[in-house]
Image: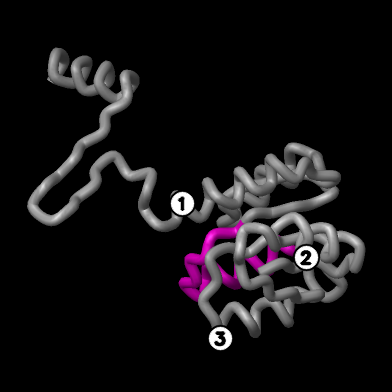
């Protein structure tokens, strides 16, 4: 789902994401987006913060208070650190600023959706097989805990 009230941005986003084979649903207001999100499952919501009826922060806040866990990638012209921190604080999963690089947007959409499906977890279970991935940092932390614990 793309939530943006700027027609040019909607066209550009749709053209960028269409090759991914995703069904793209557009909403031009926060209220319209929330109605659609409550009725349908989406892989991701790409959300502008500056909407005509409410800001994107409120959209994310209402989604999360309704226990809607669909990942949200904020795509906004607001580049201030405060806006980014506020977006993450309300429950956004990622943040990009406009104008955007098409390749980066596609990569971030893939990453956010992949993480939301559990493919970034440290363990992966396939039947009776359990694979445990451990980064160098996690391993060092565990060793330090064992030594001090």
Query: Percent position (x, y) of residue 20?
Result: 62, 58
Residue 50, picture quadrant:
bottom right
Number of labels in the image equals 3
Q: Which residue is label 1 attached to?
A: 114
Give the mark toward the camera: 3 or 2. Answer: 3
In the picture of the structure, the residue carrying the numbered disc 3 is 39
- Measuring 51% from the left and 76% from the top, which residue is drawn there? 41
At 61% from the left and 64% from the top, the residue drawn is 21
- Label whose residue precedes the other's in the sequence (3 or 2): 3
Q: Which residue is drawn at the image coordinates 55% and 81% (left, top)?
A: 40
> Does the magenta run of residues contain 57?
yes
Magenta highlight range: 56-72
Alpha carbon separation for disc pair 1 and 3: 22 Å
Residue 37 location (% of width, % of height): 59, 78
User: Mark 2 Cα within 10 Å, few/some/many (few <14, many 20+)?
Assistant: some
**Along the polypeptide, which appears first: circle 2 or circle 1?**
2
Residues at marks 2 and 1, CA–CA distance in whole angstroms: 27 Å
Relative horizontal placement of residue 141, taking residue 28 as reference (left or right)? left
**Along the polypeptide, which appears first: circle 1 or circle 3?**
3
Image marks 3 and 2: residues in contact by CB distance under 8 Å = no
Pointer 2 residue: 55
Disc 1, SS = helix
């Amino acid at each position: 789902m793309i939530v943006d009230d700027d027609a040019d941005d909607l066209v550009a986003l749709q053209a960028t994401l269409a090759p991914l084979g995703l069904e793209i649903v557009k909403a031009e207001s926060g209220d319209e987006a929330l109605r659609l999100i409550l009725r349908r499952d989406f892989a991701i919501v790409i959300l502008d913060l500056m909407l005509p009826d409410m800001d994107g922060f409120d959209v994310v806040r209402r989604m999360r208070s309704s226990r809607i866990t669909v990942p949200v990638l904020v795509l906004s012209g607001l580049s201030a650190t405060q806006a980014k921190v506020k977006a993450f604080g309300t429950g956004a999963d990622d943040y990009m600023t406009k104008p955007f690089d098409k390749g980066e947007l596609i990569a971030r959409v893939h990453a956010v959706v992949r993480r939301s499906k559990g493919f970034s977890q440290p363990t992966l279970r396939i039947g009776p097989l359990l694979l445990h991935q451990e980064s160098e940092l996690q391993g060092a932390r565990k060793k330090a805990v064992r030594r001090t614990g």
